[in-house]
Image: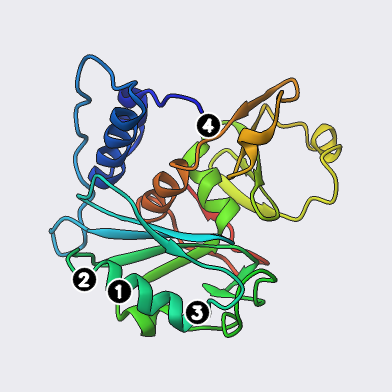
Amino acid sequence: MLAIDVDVVATGLQDEGATLFVNAWNERMGVIAAKSATLVQARKTRGGCIMHVLVVDVGGTHVKILATGQNAAREFPSGPTLTAEQMVADVKKLTADWTYDAVAIGYPGPVLNNRPLTDPWNLGRGWRGYDFEAAFQCPVKIVNDAVMQALGSYEGGKMLFLGLGTGLGSAMIVDGIVEPMELGHPRLIAALEPEYVVVGGGNVKKLKELPPGCRAGDNANAFVGGFRLWQEMRGCHASTAGKARV
């Protein structure tokens, strides 16, 4: 697993929660920088208060969550019986002592108009068209899980992200514009001509060697991407999984 350069990440973000998480993550991995990162100015809401964002990363085996101001992620099991309604109930239960004003969700499937387009093959039913804003009773932004981790991995230019989890997720970011993709074969990398490729997801650690021009991503970047959704993103356009600008 790659160490995260705390100062680089903190400088590039405008969210206190993402920076706190990166610091805590590196400390647990034993690679915390000798000098402490300077927290960047927290993003303000239109009301002038700090926006507390809850990031929810929905996976095939676990649902992981982190909120602004917290330095440790929490999780609970998912699996083939987990419905959208149950997921929301479990998240609310696990965050009863947290405060948040908005939610960012990484969903393992295509998204349209800020709602899941289909039920995921590896989870329960009831995800398609589910109204998460009504369920959480606050603003919600939902994107494909590969998109969320791609946002957290992006360092400018033209990047292709490949997520190796319980399935293969992919997203392309070109000059800050996110385009979710459905790649049928890794050989398409050559045709897309990215400047760099990030390979992430829970199964990236199983790869003995990365292809030339690729670097390993980090699951922590899913949380970073979730916080970035509530920065300069203009919202999801009506496409298969929602385009975004970062």
Q: Which is more foreground, mark 2 or mark 4?
A: 2
Q: Are marks 1 and 4 in contact (CB under 8 Å)?
A: no
Q: Residue at x 28, y 38 (%)?
A: 19
- Label 1's element? helix
Name the residue carrying label 3: 84
Q: What separation in Å lies between label 4 and label 3 (alpha carbons)?
A: 34 Å
Q: Are marks 2 and 4 in contact (CB under 8 Å)?
A: no
Name the residue carrying label 1: 92
- Label 3's element? helix
User: Mark 1 or mark 3, which has the lower sequence index?
Assistant: 3
User: Mark 1 or mark 4, which has the lower sequence index?
Assistant: 1
Within 10 angstroms of label 2, few (less than 14), some, or many (20 or more) residues? few
Within 10 angstroms of label 4, few (less than 14), some, or many (20 or more) residues? few
User: Mark 2 or mark 3, which has the lower sequence index?
Assistant: 3
Name the residue carrying label 2: 96
Residue 200 image offset from top left, x and y in percent: 60, 39
Viewer-closest of 98 and 198: 98
Q: Amino acid at mark 4?
A: Gly
Residue 244 image offset from top left, x and y in percent: 53, 55
As displayed, is residue 128 above or below residue 6?
below
Q: Which is more foreground, mark 4 or mark 3?
A: 3
Q: Are marks 2 and 1 in contact (CB under 8 Å)?
A: yes
Residue 107 image offset from top left, x and y in percent: 55, 64
Q: What separation in Å lies between label 2 and label 3 (alpha carbons)?
A: 18 Å
Q: Residue at x 52, y 47 (%)?
A: 149
